Amino acid sequence: MRPWRARRQRTPMPSGCGHKERDMPNIDLNVFQAYATAHAGESHINVDTVQRWNASWLGFSFRAAAPATAETDQVAVQTFRDALAARYGAHVADAALNAAPATALSAQRILDAVTFADARQAEKTAAFARAGAPAASPAEIARAMDFVMADVALPQGAHGVLLQAPLRDALQPLLAHVLALDATPAKTLLASLGAGLAARFENHLLRAMAQWDPAFDARAVSDIVAEIASYDELIARVPGLDVCLGLEATGFRGSVSTLLDRVQQDLPDLHARFGNGGHQPAGLTALRLTDSDPHKGGNRVAILALGDTRAVYKPRDVRIDEAISGSELASGRRSLMAQAGAQGITYRFLPRVAADGTHYGYVQHLPHGTVADHLIDSTQAPAFHTQLGRAFAALMVAGARDIHHENMIVSGGLPHFSDLEFALSGRTFTPLAQALAAAAQPGGEAADAALRDALDRLMKGMQLEKIFELSTDTNSLLPTHHVHDNAFMPAPGLTDVVESVLAIRDATTGVITDNRNLRPLDARVADPLGRHMQPMTPAFSQTYAADVARGMRDGLAALQKAQNARNEYLDFVQNAGDFQVRHHPIQTSDQRLALGDLLQTGFSQRDLGDACDAFEGRLGNAQLDTLVQALDECDGEAKQALQRAMTQALGVLDVPYFSRVVNETSLRPDGAAPLAWDTPAGRSTDYFPQDLTAAPQAFATTLAGLTPATLARIESAVEQWMQLRGPSVSERYAIDSFAQYIDSPTLALIDALYADPRQAARFAP
């Protein structure tokens, strides 16, 4: 999940342009230097002039921009600062500009700032070299950490200072390890990782502040920070904070160390599999741990950049994902998506296995969030939705679940599906078989009703309806407050989901619509209650229902052909025998509630020993007790063993993770050794009554026998089901309510999509 951070600063558009904002220009530092050298006496540099001058070297005509104003001076200084930060890091950039403070950006200021930054960067590089040596002294390590901490973006607000000491302690053990693989220009890899950890620390800090003063959110941030005085004072009253940050730090260091070791070992294969032939450094040029739920001792999904090579690291077995949606498989097999005729939306994987037998892997990075990714022409829309239908067919025969709006990524104008670890599930195969059996009947009221019911259970069991209806995701572990303008502001408790947004531009009129009906407020009409509503237009799920239905029919037919001609479907099932797929004894949202219960108990203790007891599970967890007792998939000693495993995971702040090997009957906490318990007959690991192969093997017979009439009935039922889908009005209100200081990728995308002011006039009903 994404944390909520202050939006990046933007220059407001002139008045009269609604709530849209303009990003700062992006000019390389080399261009600034060259311009300053060529125009040494210039006292007010305008970024438009710099851009035009640079373009003139490429053959374009050059003429100076209008005279400088206070606004253009501000833009110039900020743009130059961003260019400095891109090369030297934020701390050096700010220090270089502050060394010669001025309102305007002059040529001499540019040259002086670069000279200052070069000297400071040389000092920083030397400090890192000394700290990375095997016999580095404590003083040398401390000096290097001074530079790291200077570049860490702490949470905005006076409370950030309270996190400096624990954050430094958390990062320092990683210094040499990270530096060895840091290929960033200014050696800022550890600082960027620290910024992500600081955001997680902030969430716990706010919990501790609520314990310090239950009315903390009615006070100014600076006032309560002054009262607390120091981190040590805070943890003396709320010792659970120190325990919690220690657990976060331990998980963070373990996950980063494991990731770095694996990347270093896999570097040649990463470039070979995901590189585009461009720059291929022997290290990381960017690394971001995502806000996915932590599993397996704090491990998280990570986004990697190695020069021009981009990949996503997943600390789990990715072989099932590749078998469903992969391209160019090393085995030479075709994934189910390819078999279904959706080859255009497959992507590359790199499954790996560690020396200890642990599976992990890498996935092709699917960029999203930009207009280029999410906007297509109306002439492309039918093909998009036909591919969507073919993908649905592949996902159904894979027995997939959890195919919601967060797991569909619109990238490059095409739909892709990620996180396909919930697969080969009987809870998908059962309604699929029932729907196909009902479709095989000649029709009639009873048969039609049975088909509609089974299809609805199938689609909703896979969570496919969320792709068409939802724009946000709730998470009970998100912070309850944001800090903004020295005040504690209430947080919405949810994140927006930009991944599955699709916008279509009419090829004739140029009008843009989107599948969430999230057009800017100034493009809507007000209802009698004063709320901003959308002009009523058919949802994409309705407009393109026939295309999705036709794609599903054709996908099933293609899968049938692949099985009957080459036994490809059964080969998929047999090959998946030793794959690990995910299993939820308790759904994620409920597991988060159990973790929230643990955090509340731990933070409410006033004695350090009691706080430790809470996080180690000795004070109980009422929420977890209730959830486990309600389980009906296991009982007796097995249920107790499951609760012990979940308590252990929660105790290191993990959201518990369980998987199973396809051809086994055991359940594996953290994907490791099978869960075991004592029975009268001896030690047992048989958590499930049977393995996962029976349902797909039985389905292979059904797939082989599908008739054109059955497929036609399925097509008709899917079209009817799609006609009932549409975006939720409450979701639009939720995203509209996001304050301007809250990061919202969806609003940023919508702003960019509808940036043309002429669009607003076209939206009028």
Image (cartoon, helix red, strand yellow):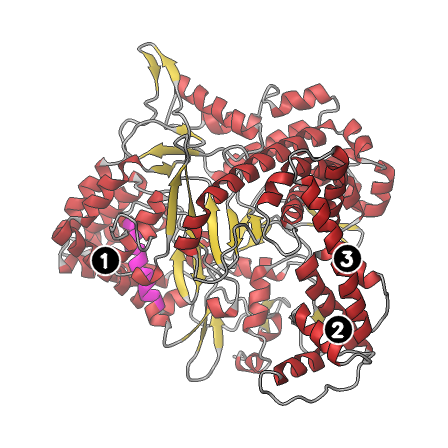
Element at badge 1? helix
Q: Mark 2 and mark 1: span between their CA atoms?
A: 60 Å
Q: Main secondary structure of the magenta part?
A: helix
Q: Nearer the viewer, mark 3 or mark 2?
A: 3
Residue pictured at 68% horizontal, 68% vertical: 29
Q: Which residues are magenta?
A: 384-396
Q: Residue 370: x, y in percent?
A: 52, 66
Residue pictured at 56% horizontal, 74% vertical: 754
Q: Residue 654: x, y in percent?
A: 54, 34
Q: Residue 487: x, y in percent?
A: 79, 51
Q: Mark 3 and mark 2: span between their CA atoms?
A: 23 Å
The magenta stretch spans residue 144 = no
Q: Amino acid at mark 1?
A: Ile
Q: Amino acid at mark 3?
A: Ala
Q: Which mark is residue 714?
A: 1
| Res 155 visible | no
Element at badge 3? helix
Q: Amino acid at mark 2?
A: Ala
**Residue that badge 2 annotates:** 76
**Residue that badge 3 annotates:** 119
Examine the image and state in which quarter residue 7 appears.
Answer: bottom right
